Image (cartoon, rainbow, N blue to C red):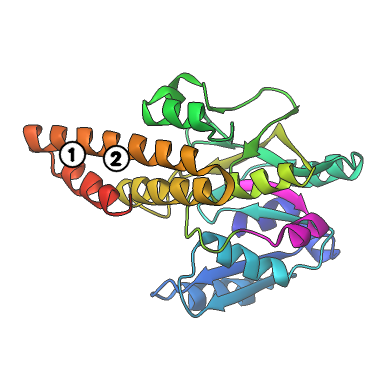
Amino acid sequence: MESLYAQFEDEFKSNKIELIIVDNASGDDSVKTIQKEIDKHHYKNMHLIANKENAGFGRGCNLGAKHAKGKYIAFLNNDTVVKDHGMLKMAEYMHDRKGIAILGGQLRNFDGSLQASAGKFYTPLNAFLLMTGMQKFGLLDKSPTKIVQVDWVKGGLFVIRSEVFQKLGGFDEKIFMYTEDMELCYRAKMAGYKVYFYPYVKVLHADQGSSNRTFAIVNIYKNLLYFYKKHRTHREYLFLKSLLKTKAYGLLLTGKLTKNDYLIKTYEEALKVT
């Protein structure tokens, strides 16, 4: 909130941009604290929505989007710090290129290093590469150095045309967290829209700042299966399910042999959703 206002104070005051903050039932004093900061600094065009339940990333974003008035909607994680005007330039770039429906931005770690911010759809081959750890070699996730068309972009930072978001029905609310960005871009591509990546923006992001690693892995397992059931063939779904189970059993065995509580807990939970 503070970093956005520091970068875009003039745009906030001139009604060029607005910020909609959705709190997903934090369970602490977050709502009071945020509203107090908005009132204290007299931030213009900042609106806080207090959700009554933690409905997940996608549903929270959909709720915020319903209140958005702009031609473009920029989704930005709460665990980010904006360091330049790149987000506004993303919208300006899209404005001049009608063929782009979704434009993802480059995320960086707090030490300045790049986070992989775009990726390839999880086809059976790519799902196999993911499960065998090949993503660390840049075979799936990447950070292009120039503006280029991609399969999907990370939900931590991207801009979408408001009319496109509405036509697609927003994020799939059956996905609580993780892969919802990939699934949205997949539906966009199936509908004939183009997804591009824009590297000329500086936004720092605390990777997995809103969850822990076990939670992330379990939900990725669950949501990949959901994605395959929704969008791929039944044979491909069964292939993915066997792949996930094989990896989970292998790492669970490794955990028991090495007495690694993290592996045991994580992959016992992962097997429950497969």
Instruction: Say whether residue 113 is left or right of residue 86.
Output: left
Instruction: Name the spot of residue 234 as percent of width and height, x first.
Output: 49, 44
Is 141 one of the magenta-colored residues? no
Instruction: Say whether residue 251 is left or right of residue 52.
Output: left
Q: Nearer the viewer, residue 73 or 133?
A: 133
Q: Which residue is mark 2?
A: 245
Judge whether residue 155 can be spotted in this image. Answer: no
The kind of residue tagged 1 is Leu
The kind of residue tagged 2 is Lys
Q: Residue at x 47, y 60 (%)?
A: 176
- Position of the N terminus by quadrant: bottom right
Q: Secondary structure at mark 2?
A: helix
Looking at the image, is 6 positioned above or below residue 252?
A: below
Q: Which residue is mark 1?
A: 252
Q: Which residues are magenta?
A: 156-171
Is 166 one of the magenta-colored residues? yes
Image quadrant where residue 43 sits: bottom right
Q: Residue 153 bears which disc, if any?
A: none
Q: Nearer the viewer, residue 38 or 189?
A: 189
Instruction: Say whether residue 123 is left or right of residue 238.
Output: right
Judge whether residue 45 can be spotted in this image. Answer: yes
Looking at the image, is 28 positioned above or below residue 225?
A: below
Image quadrant where residue 171 sits: bottom right
Q: Nearer the viewer, residue 233 or 191?
A: 233
